[in-house]
Image (cartoon, rainbow, N blue to C red):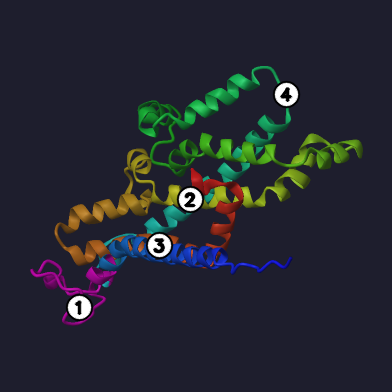
């Protein structure tokens, strides 16, 4: 008896359905990206308009002529370069200190046993759920008692303790194979040498993710630097932009020009390191947090 094979239609239908869903997902992603880019495009468009056209009704995307007058006035009438330098000093310092302290704390919690370990880890986890605004008054009183108000240290030190970064690195160290460390320990390596020469190189994706997110959060932080310093020569970009807005009033072109300049370093960093950012997020599982 001979059998006649039936035509296979299911794989084609599955393939068409997959392509359709991929197309829908691509269109949705494009719309979301456009939605996120609209404020940035509007800020740039307003910054290159003449000041008298920024509040005209009806609103127009295309000005009568493009001008960089707003950018020139921002540089001439503010200490923008000084604020850039201050933000760079504070952000780089905080990022480096967070990488060092969070990686050491995460490795210690992951690989060592000591009395009170679970309690300490529980306190760190609880610290993630505490809003930073709750500890502002005690932190300010502490900085005042130490005589650090109106200094770089007043902006740097309180931002170094980040429980979330300790948690991320601790979970990453938990996933590293212990066989490498046991082999190094048999060869006589100390705990510090194992951490520095084995754990740190293997955790580069996690360290890159922590460093990137710490850099972005610190650069954009307004609340604590606003409280910690009152000296204009120590202001960071967000604090300085707030003073520009209050002094310029309703000069929308200059306000938008200063905002574009303040966010430009983050945009440039993302353009040059976007592959590292995406790879770091994928390796550490931060996309779901």
Location of mark 2 (residue) = 91
Magenta-span inclusion, residue 216: no
Q: How far is mark 3 from mark 1, CA to CA?
A: 26 Å
Q: On the picture, is 155 further left or further right than 97?
A: left
Q: Which mark is residue 113?
A: 4
Q: Which residues are magenta?
A: 43-71
Disc with the residue nearer the chain's start (1 vs 4) = 1
Q: Is the stretch drawn in magenta largely helix, strand or loop?
A: loop
Q: How far is mark 4 from mark 3, CA to CA?
A: 46 Å
Q: On the picture, is 24 further left or further right than 112?
A: left
* Residue at (12% x, 66% y) in the render: 55
* Residue at (17% x, 74% y) in the render: 50
For disc 4, the neighbor class at 10 Å (few under 14, some 14 to 19, many from 20) is few
Disc with the residue nearer the chain's start (4 vs 3) = 3
Residue 12 percent coordinates (x, y): 54, 68
Disc with the residue nearer the chain's start (1 vs 2) = 1
Quarter occupied by residue 223:
top left
Location of mark 3 (residue) = 29
For disc 2, the neighbor class at 10 Å (few under 14, some 14 to 19, many from 20) is many
- Residue positioned most to the bottom: 65
Q: Nearer the viewer, mark 3 or mark 1?
A: 3
For disc 3, the neighbor class at 10 Å (few under 14, some 14 to 19, many from 20) is few
Q: Is residue 234 above or below residue 138?
A: below
- Secondary structure, mark 1, is loop
């Amino acid at each position: 008896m001979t059998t006649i094979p039936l035509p296979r239609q299911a794989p084609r239908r599955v393939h068409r359905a997959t392509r359709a869903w991929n197309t829908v997902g691509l269109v949705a992603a494009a719309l979301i990206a456009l939605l996120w880019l609209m404020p940035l495009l509007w800020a740039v468009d307003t910054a290159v308009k003449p000041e008298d056209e920024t509040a005209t009704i009806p609103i127009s995307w295309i000005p009568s002529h493009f001008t960089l007058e707003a950018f020139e006035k921002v540089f001439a009438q503010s200490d923008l370069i000084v604020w850039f330098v201050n933000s760079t000093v504070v952000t780089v310092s905080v990022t480096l200190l967070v990488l060092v302290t969070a990686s050491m704390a995460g490795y210690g919690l992951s690989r060592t046993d000591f009395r009170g370990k679970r309690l300490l880890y529980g306190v760190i986890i609880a610290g993630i759920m505490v809003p930073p605004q709750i500890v502002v008054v005690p932190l300010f009183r502490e900085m005042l008692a130490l005589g650090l108000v109106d200094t770089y240290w007043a902006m740097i030190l309180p931002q170094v303790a980040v429980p979330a970064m300790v948690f991320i690195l601790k979970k990453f160290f938990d996933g590293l194979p212990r066989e490498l460390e046991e082999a190094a320990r048999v060869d006589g390596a100390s705990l510090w040498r194992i951490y520095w020469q084995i754990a740190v190189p293997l955790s580069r994706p996690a360290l890159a993710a922590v460093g990137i997110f710490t850099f972005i959060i610190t650069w954009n932080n307004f609340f604590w630097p606003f409280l910690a310093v009152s000296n204009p020569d120590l202001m960071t970009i967000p604090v300085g932009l707030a003073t520009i807005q209050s002094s310029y009033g309703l000069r929308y072109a200059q306000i938008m020009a200063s905002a574009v300049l303040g966010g430009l370093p983050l945009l440039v960093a993302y353009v040059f390191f976007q592959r590292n950012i995406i790879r770091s997020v994928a390796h550490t599982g931060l996309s779901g947090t």
